Amino acid sequence: MFVPLLIAIHVLCVVIWIGGVAFVTMIVFPMIMRIEGSIEKVLFFQGVEHRFAKIAKLCVIIVGITGVLLLQMMNEWNLLFKRAGIGPTFMLIVWVFYVLILLFEGKLFKVIFRGDAQQDTAKVFFRLTVFHWIVLGLSLLAVVIGVLAGHGGV
């Protein structure tokens, strides 16, 4: 009973987290790019990011905790970084990538906003959009590999 509940919580938080990344990438950034004024772009982005960042961080924490508990309870630590454990291994790698992004978000933004991008919001949001598409692609790949691996497809 406990393992299915953990899996449900784990998947629910992944859906909220990755769904939010997809929404920001596919809906919010195109809307931002159509806004005329630089200040308006920044304010709109900050409003969305401020609201979603808290939700994403909470989901990433819960996904990490439930993932560790599931590996422990199902005694699957030995599968990590082996062909038989490609699903949990790739999910772990993507999760660590997100944790690093969240931990070093300030430094990452300094890199994205450096140089002439500080003065050109179109460049900043273009860079953010490209970055989000890369992150979303990795996230969706982790979901696909996880599902396939969990159902004998990989």
Image (cartoon, rainbow, N blue to C red):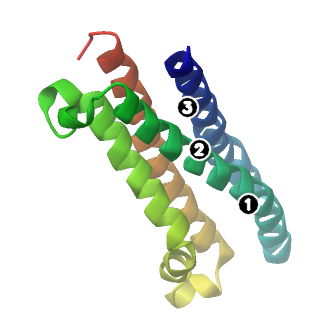
Q: Secondary structure at mark 2?
A: helix
Tell me if I can see residue 127 in this picture: no
Q: Which residue is mark 2?
A: 62
State if disc 2 and disc 3 touch (CB < 8 Å): yes
Q: Rate crowding at label 1 as few (under 14), some (14 to 19) or many (20 or more) other CA atoms within 10 Å.
A: some
Q: Nearer the viewer, residue 32 or 20?
A: 20
Mark 2 Cα shell of 10 Å, populated few (<14), some (14-19), many (≥20): some
Q: Counting residues from the N terminus, which is met first, the one under dot 3 or under dot 1?
A: 3
Residue type at mark 2: give it. Answer: Ile
Q: Position of residue 87 (x, y in %)?
A: 30, 29
Residues under labels 3 and 1: Cα distance? 23 Å
Number of the front mark, 3 or 1: 3
Say which residue label 3 marks: 10
Q: Please state the horizontal and vertical placement of residue 10, each as a whole percent of the image.
A: 55, 31
Q: Nearer the viewer, mark 2 or mark 1?
A: 2
Identity of the residue furthest to the left in this view: 82
Q: Is residue 132 above or below residue 43?
A: above
* Left or right side of 35 for 70: left
Hey, what amino acid is under mark 3? His
Q: What residue do we see at 83% from left, 76% from top? A: 39
